[in-house]
């Protein structure tokens, strides 16, 4: 079978689809996808988190192979834990020694984590076509400490259509300091079909 690619990823529909796709993609994800597409979103999210004064303990959700945590480590931010539905992606991350703990979990349901644990929540590439929608935000807020900083990438094409804009507005006074900088997801050498893809980084604090 050919390695999965972006078209396969954007075509996912259910958490079970994600488990299957990322099982098959874990081995080639870093060199076959991230490097060839100039995938810059994880670094952009990490840099935005650090620039806003983000500090550990951080939970990196949809952590995958750990590209975001690698940049957080360079920026001196930690400790960082990882959460992802794919044990194979997390195994790649664990092998890099970037996380103090990893959690195999489904972000679309209740999370097996206590209230108020984290001083920061980060995510890149997971709030996108066919992956995780705004329903995950309530549980992420529950496990964050008061004042915790969030830096979550949201694919610009799904920001309105999947209800992220509506959800962030509905959170009202539960969050503060919302900012939505827009960034390029890939580098100039990416496939022409996706070279121009953009994401918003939802930066906010839990009240
Ligand atoms: C495009 S990858 C991004 C990985 C990493 N953050 C990065 O930027 O390289 C999306 C990740 O979301 C995870 N994922 C998809 N659906 C999920 C769900 N329902 N719960 C938790 N993780 C999920 C996948 O397993 C995958 O590792």
Image (cartoon, grey):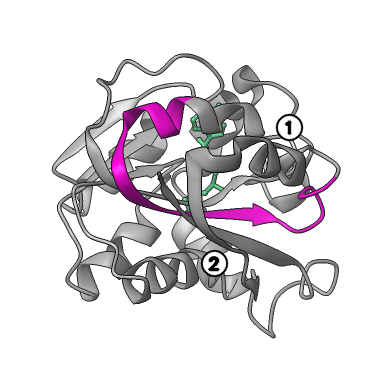
Q: Is mark 2 within 8 Å of ligand 1?
A: yes
What numbered label is drawn on residue 153? none
- Residue situated furthest bottom in the rendering: 188
CB contact under 8 Å: marks 1 and 2 = no
Name which quarter of the figure residue 199 lies in: bottom right
Q: Which quadrant holds the N terminus?
A: top right
| 48 w.r.t. 134: above or below | below
Give whichever of 72, 120 is nearer the camera.
120
- Secondary structure at badge 1 equals loop
Per the image, the residue denoted by label 1 is 12
| Residues packed near mark 1 inside 10 Å, few (<14), some (14 to 19) or many (20 plus) | some
> In the rendered view of the protein, which quadrant contains the C terminus?
top left
Q: Residue at x 17, y 57 (%)?
A: 78
Give the residue pinned by disc 2. 41
Residue drawn at (53%, 41%) of the image:
173
Q: Is residue 154 magenta?
A: yes
Q: Indicate yes or no: mark 1 CB to ligand 1 under 8 Å.
A: yes
Q: Residue 2 sits in which quadrant?
A: top right
Farthest-out residue, front: 173
The quadrant where residue 94 appears: top left
Task: Write the residue at 46% across / 65% down.
Answer: 45
- Residue 122: give x, y in percent of width and height: 41, 51
Of badges 1 and 2, nearer the viewer stands 2
Magenta stretch in the rendered image: 139-160
In the rendered view, does 6 fall on the left or right side of 75? right
Secondary-structure class at tag 2:
helix
Q: List x then y, in percent, for residue 33.
A: 57, 61
Sequence order check: which comes first, mark 1 or mark 2? 1
The residue nearer to you, when weighing 158 against 149, is: 149
């Amino acid at each position: 079978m050919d390695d999965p690619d972006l078209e396969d990823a954007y075509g996912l529909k259910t958490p079970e689809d994600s488990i299957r796709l990322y099982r098959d993609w874990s081995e080639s994800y870093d060199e076959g996808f991230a490097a060839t597409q100039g995938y810059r979103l994880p670094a952009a999210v990490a840099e935005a988190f650090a620039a806003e004064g983000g500090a550990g303990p951080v939970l990196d959700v949809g952590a995958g192979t750990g590209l975001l945590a690698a940049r957080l480590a360079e920026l001196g931010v930690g400790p960082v834990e990882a959460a992802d539905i794919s044990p194979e992606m997390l195994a790649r991350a664990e092998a890099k020694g970037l996380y103090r703990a990893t959690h195999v979990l489904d972000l679309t349901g209740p999370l097996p984590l206590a209230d108020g644990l984290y001083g920061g929540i980060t995510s890149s590439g997971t709030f996108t076509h066919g992956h995780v929608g705004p329903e995950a935000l309530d549980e992420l807020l529950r496990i964050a400490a008061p004042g915790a900083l969030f830096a979550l990438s949201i694919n610009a094409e799904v920001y309105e259509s999947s209800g992220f804009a509506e959800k962030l507005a509905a959170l009202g006074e539960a969050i503060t300091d919302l900012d939505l900088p827009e960034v390029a997801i890939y580098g100039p050498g990416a496939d022409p079909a996706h070279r121009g893809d953009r994401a918003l980084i939802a930066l906010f604090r839990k009240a």
